[in-house]
Amino acid sequence: MTISAEKTKYELTGQEKRFIGWHILVAVIALFVGSLFGPLQAFEFSGWDLYQYLAPALKSYYQGLTLHGVLNALVWTTFFIVGFTNLTTIKGLRRPLSHPMLNKIGFWTMLVGLVTTAVPLLAGTATVLYTFYPPLEASWAFYLGLTLVVVGSWIEGYGFFLTYRGWRKDNPGIRSPFIAFAGVMNMAMWQIATLGVAAEILSMLLPWSLGMIDATDPELARTYFWFTGHPLVYFWLLPAYISWYGMLPKQAGGKLFSDSLARLAFWLFLLVSVPVGFHHQFVDPGIATGWKWIHAGLTYAVFFPSMLTAFTVIASLEYAGRKRGGTGLIGWIRALPWKDPSVSAQLLAGILFMFGGIGGLVNASYNINTVIHNTTWVPGHFHLTVATAVTLSFIGISYWLVPHITGKKLYKPSWAVVQTWVWFVGMIIFSNAMHVLGLLGAPRRTPLGEAPYVPEEWSGHLLRVSIGGGILFVAVIMYVWIMLRTATGKKADPEDVPEIPIAESLRDPQLTPEWLDSFKPWLIGAVILIVVAYGPQLLEQIANIQLNAPGIGPP
Ligand code: HEM
Ligand SMILES: [Cu+2]
């Protein structure tokens, strides 16, 4: 018998909905505030300097850029993901959290951490950009706050692991439901991945900013940072994949094409997410070329689960499109429910992600990387990935999730569809211009409007960055407005409130081999790979630690 066919239906309780809602609320506020700086940066590129009017509240371009990166890339994502993982765990396993108190403590720890980080950020004493590379030095409160956000996410993670373990005990031999499995796996990957920043902050940055040590070792700090920094992008992306694999097919009227392939892809991401961090350090002098090559090679290995994903998700959507009467080579694409804002958001996110992936292959290539390293190509790339594939997917998810947890109807669904297209168009203009500028050598993290060296050939592209950025800002405002009006609207008839979409697998998931549903071998494999790919280099850098760089303030 298939167990995916609702054996026991589990509806989220009011308390569970509220708890998830708190995460989403913090996430959306972070996205809103963080995105206020996006157009400021984009306008600055064509010489329209709004910062002069914002002083002294905002001290510099860099303070704004730090707020933008931290709030958008770190806070919006983390809060949304942890909230969403509550939902996938509870709904997927069809049972409440086993230790809800633990998750509450985790959430509050994250929130206290966020406030602790926000104070120095707003005061201008943590203008170190979201990568906080030393010797740029922030107030200790910034590092402490970030630590608390991570620790809080760990604690919520323990809540998910214990719930999963309880389910496993009660259901021996049964394949775990895909969305629950995948969410828990992502949190497990996160626990391993964040050991890098934990080591960096606790052993170096916090004692340094507290004055217990005078100077720091920027190279070791970077190595620790990127141990976390690369898997961080998979921590962001995998929840979007959970929706693409496990929910979107249902919304489109189809089924998950292959439960086995979906799980295999997730396990491969667990294996190769961490041991690739040196691909961010290709130009760092302290790491031997051989190790950089190994990490470059392992990065190419990520291509394989990415292709599995492209294949499985597109096959699931094609199945849905044909069931809806779509025919021909591309007729099935048109037959998909584009009028559903949640679907259009995720389809458009997926389309832009393909270009993000292609650009990513350039970034990953040791020699070609030198062409685009530290140019505007890089933010051009990650506005397609984290700021679109992930963000636009989360926006799409929230178009059913927020109505579901508030018991309201989505405010103006047709506007929501327009919102997704505005984002799509704005991002095409913005990110294309950023990529081209990068190839022409324009540096990132630079208020280019003030730079004396800007050649004439950049000017059209700089203008396109501003135009695209302005359009994107409209899309953000539309999204936040729709969320606000939805959450503050009237309670709807329960029948008009969307259900949580869970895609059935085309084949009984019980036929998925057991080795694809067991954590142990994959976790062991992941740790071995990390030890092999990181161990020798990390030990060497720790053994030769050079605490000789004194802190410097922001420019
Ligand atoms: C209103 C929409 C947005 C606009 C117009 C925008 C614009 C920009 C621009 C122009 C830069 C480059 C600044 C520079 O290198 O000097 C930038 C950097 C960045 N953006 Fe956005 N962005 C937007 C939304 C987002 C979103 C949604 C995310 C993530 C979820 C994001 C994450 C980042 C990050 C991480 C950086 C790099 C910061 C750094 O270099 O330290 N942005 N953005
Ligand atoms: Cu990376």
Image (cartoon, grey):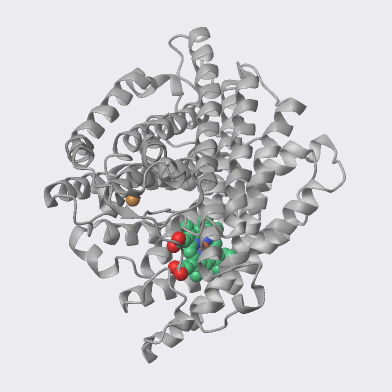
Going by the picture, which residue comes out furthest to the right? 490
Going by the picture, which residue comes out furthest to the left? 290
Give the x, y percent position of residue 90.
Answer: 61, 25
Asked if 519 appears above or below 504 in the picture, the reply is above
Viewer can see residue 552: yes
Asked if 146 appears above or below 523 in the picture, the reply is below
Q: Is residue 297 left or right of residue 510?
A: left
Residue occupying image coordinates x 60% and y 74%: 470
Q: Quadrant of residue 362?
A: bottom left
Q: Nearer the viewer, residue 111 or 173?
A: 111
Q: Nearer the viewer, residue 176 or 217?
A: 217
Going by the picture, which residue comes out furthest to the bottom? 456
Quadrant of the image containing the C terminus = bottom left
Q: Is residue 381 left or right of residue 322?
A: left
Q: Nearer the viewer, residue 354 or 293?
A: 293
Q: Is residue 66 left or right of residue 281?
A: right
Residue occupying image coordinates x 77% and y 39%: 406
Give the x, y percent position of residue 529.
Answer: 23, 32
